[in-house]
Image (tube, grey):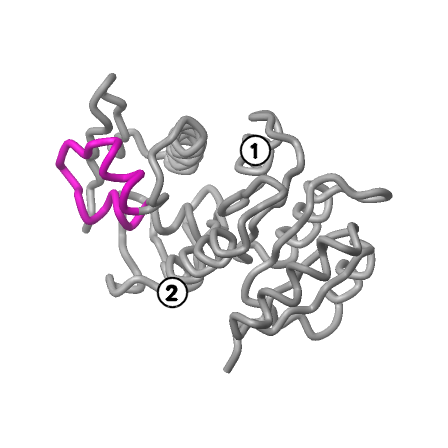
Amino acid sequence: MKTKILLVEDDPDFGMILKQYLELEEFDVTWFQNPEEAVSLLSSDFTFQIGILDIMMPNMDGFSLAKIILKEKPSFPLLFLTAKNQKIDRLTGLKIGADDYISKPCDPEELVLRIRNILKRSIPATLETHINIGSYTLDSEKLLLSHPNGNVRLTVREKDLLLYLLKHNNQTIKRDDILDNLWEANDYFSGRSLDVFISRLRKYFSDDSQIKIQSLRGIGFEIDFPVK
């Protein structure tokens, strides 16, 4: 069965090129030029595996569309297309919950590679489905982190990062190793992305003082998860 992609791009020429190329790569692509049409799908049959959203669109930008989608589909993988090579766009997208970004005009082969990497990371890990971490419980299949004070629905990348840290519990983890294994890139923006996701995990686990994700300057992180 072909992977179903939601493509939202208001530029008719660029959108058509992307759609045709992705279909040649055996993806099933539904393309909207109007982001509001994509929103209308949330109340019907939303069966996509990944979304590709342009940031700069009239009426509704990609960030606003992403927030609406993620509110209904918290674990839905997203990749942003940006025409502006500015870090504020990229960091904003990462904070919202995007899994990746690519600048326009983009190399179609690179786009396909990024899509496949995201989809590969989205496959549930082979670890136990339920993991007790201090006073928290992680359901890795449902992307749910539960605690008596409240639950958090994780994004796919948050889950993948957490599982990676759990696999290296009570160890010093090199920053470069995380970037190479999960981001498959080791540049400035990937590093900032990692910082954003580490900050989120610290916030999620803030109700248990036993859980420690300590930064080691110039090295990486020291992890202490009281796993039961």
Please give the residue where the numbered disc 2 appears in the rendered image. Answer: 123
- Mark 2 secondary-structure assignment: loop
Q: Is tag 2's residue or tag 1's residue first in the polypeptide sequence?
A: 1
Instruction: Return the residue found at the far top.
Output: 217
Q: Quadrant of residue 180?
A: top left
53 horizontally vs 183: left or right? right
Which residue is at a point 46% across and 53% down the rendered structure image?
A: 114
Residue sitting at x 55%, y 30%:
91
User: Taking 192 as reference, is 127 left or right?
Assistant: left
Q: Residue at x 72, y 61 (%)?
A: 16
Residue kind at label 2, given as amino acid type: Ile
Q: Is residue 37 left or right of residue 55?
A: right
Query: How many other residues sit within 10 Å of disc 1, few (<14), some (14-19) or many (≥20)?
Result: many
The residue stretch that appears in magenta: 162-181
Give the class, few, some or many, for how many residues have Cα within 10 Å of label 2's Cα (few <14, many ≥20): few
Residue 201 rendering spot, x and y as whole percentages: 39, 37
Q: Residue furthest bottom?
A: 1
Q: Is residue 35 above or below residue 23?
A: above
Front residue of 173/101: it is 101
- Residue 29: horizontal and vertical position, in percent? 64, 69
Three-letter amino acid code at the position of disc 1: Arg
User: Residue placed at 79% from the left, 51% from the top?
Assistant: 10
Mark yes or no: residue 147 visible.
Answer: no
Observer able to see residue 98: yes
**As drawn, 171 above or below 127:** above
Q: Position of residue 27 (x, y in %)?
A: 55, 71
**Does residue 26 lie above or below 187 as drawn?**
below
Question: Label 1 belongs to which residue?
Answer: 90
The overriding secondary structure of the stretch rendered in magenta is helix
**Rendering quarter of residue 63:** top right
